[in-house]
C-alpha cells in the first residue's frame, strides 16, 4: 500500500512522512520491507488512501487464504 500511494500520487517518501506524520526513515523502512507500519500508522494510511479514492487506483487483488494452524 505504501509504495502504491507513493507511485500513484507521485509523492516522495519525505512527503508521505510529513502527511502521516512519521519520519523519513520509517517510510523508507516500510518501502524496503524492513518494517511494517504500526496499527496507528495503518489507520493513518487507510484514511489517506480513502481521501484520494485509492481503491479505484489499483486492480482488485485475489483474497488471501487464512493461515492454516498446525495441530
Image (tube, rainbow, N blue to C red):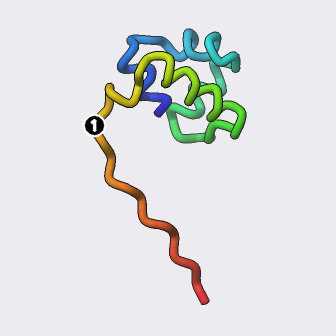
4, above or below 68, in the image: above
In which quadrant of the rendered view does residue 65 lie? Answer: bottom left
Q: Quick one: SS at disc 1?
A: loop
* Left or right side of 23 for 53: left
**Against 61, is 50 above or below?**
above
Residue 45 location, x and y as percent? 58, 27
Q: Residue furthest left?
A: 59
Q: Name the residue under label 1.
A: 59
**Number of disc labels:** 1
Where 57 falls versus 33 (above or below)? above
**In the rendered image, which quarter is residue 14 located in?**
top right
> Which percent across, then down, holds residue 41?
67, 31
Residue at screen point 33% across, 46% down: 61
Residue drawn at x 59%, y 32% as measured from the top left: 29
**Where does the C terminus fall, quadrant-wise?**
bottom right
The quarter of the picture where residue 9 lies is top left
- Give coordinates of residue 54: x percent, y percent: 41, 25
Q: For mark 1, does the 10 Å Cα neighbourhood hold few (<14), some (14 to 19), or many (20 or more) residues?
A: few
Amino acid at each position: 500500500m505504501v509504495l502504491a500511494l507513493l507511485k500513484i500520487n507521485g509523492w516522495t517518501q519525505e512527503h508521505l512522512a510529513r502527511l502521516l506524520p512519521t519520519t523519513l526513515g520509517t517510510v523508507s523502512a516500510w518501502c524496503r520491507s524492513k518494517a511494517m507500519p504500526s496499527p496507528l500508522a495503518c489507520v493513518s494510511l487507510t484514511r489517506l488512501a480513502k481521501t484520494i479514492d485509492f481503491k479505484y487506483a489499483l486492480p482488485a487483488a485475489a483474497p488471501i487464504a487464512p493461515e492454516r494452524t498446525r495441530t
